[in-house]
Image (tube, rainbow, N blue to C red):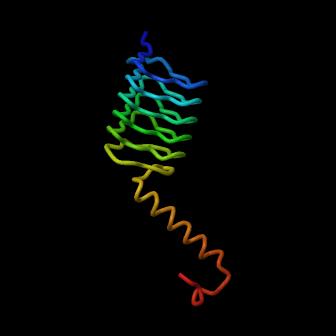
Amino acid sequence: MRSVLIGSNVEIGANTTVDRGSWRNTVIESGCKLDNLVQIGHNVRLRKGCVIAAQSGVAGSTTLGQRVLVGGQSGIGQHITLGDDVQVLAKSAVLRSVNSGGVGGRPALPVRDYHKTKALIKRMLTARMDPRPESESVV
């Protein structure tokens, strides 16, 4: 039977759940900060200095590298690896491994692509709501 190993200087917020490991230990290394209402699945490994904001979840058998930052209301799928210093924007759904940089959105994209996509959608919606014919629209 496996268990949960928690390093020193770890903060775990209210109503946070950490599942014990099934085939390996669930490990939270030193210096990690877990906000309120965070779910850590079985066999997860959080390396040193990870910070996970409220209402986020990390599915089973996932590994977060050192100093990974996860924004609130984010979800990280199972059997995924996030490299050192990866940043996950709030309300993101990470479905694939990420080696470096930041990701955001549903499904998560590199931050630059995420912001470009949001801007494009905003422009498309604004153009759709503009009552003037296309020839008179201001760009």
Give whichever of 75, 37 is nearer the camera: 37
When asked about the image quadrant of residue 8, the answer is top left
Quarter of the image that includes the N terminus: top left
In the image, residue 7 sits, relative to residue 110, either above or below, namely above
Residue at far right of view:
131
In the image, residue 139 sits, relative to residue 117, either above or below, namely below
Q: Residue at x 39, y 53 (%)?
A: 110
Q: Residue at x 40, y 58 (%)?
A: 112
- In the picture provided, is 98 more to the left or to the right than 106? left
**Residue 121 picture location, percent across and down:** 54, 66
When asked about the image quadrant of residue 10, the answer is top left
Give whichever of 32, 99 is nearer the camera: 32
Residue at far top of view:
1
Q: Tag count in the figure?
A: 0
Q: Residue at x 60, y 73 (%)?
A: 126
**Residue 23 picture location, percent across and down:** 39, 18
- In the picture provided, is 57 more to the left or to the right than 101? right
**Residue 117 picture location, percent across and down:** 48, 62
**Residue 83 picture location, percent across and down:** 32, 38
Q: Residue at x 31, y 43 (%)?
A: 99
Residue at far front of view:
9
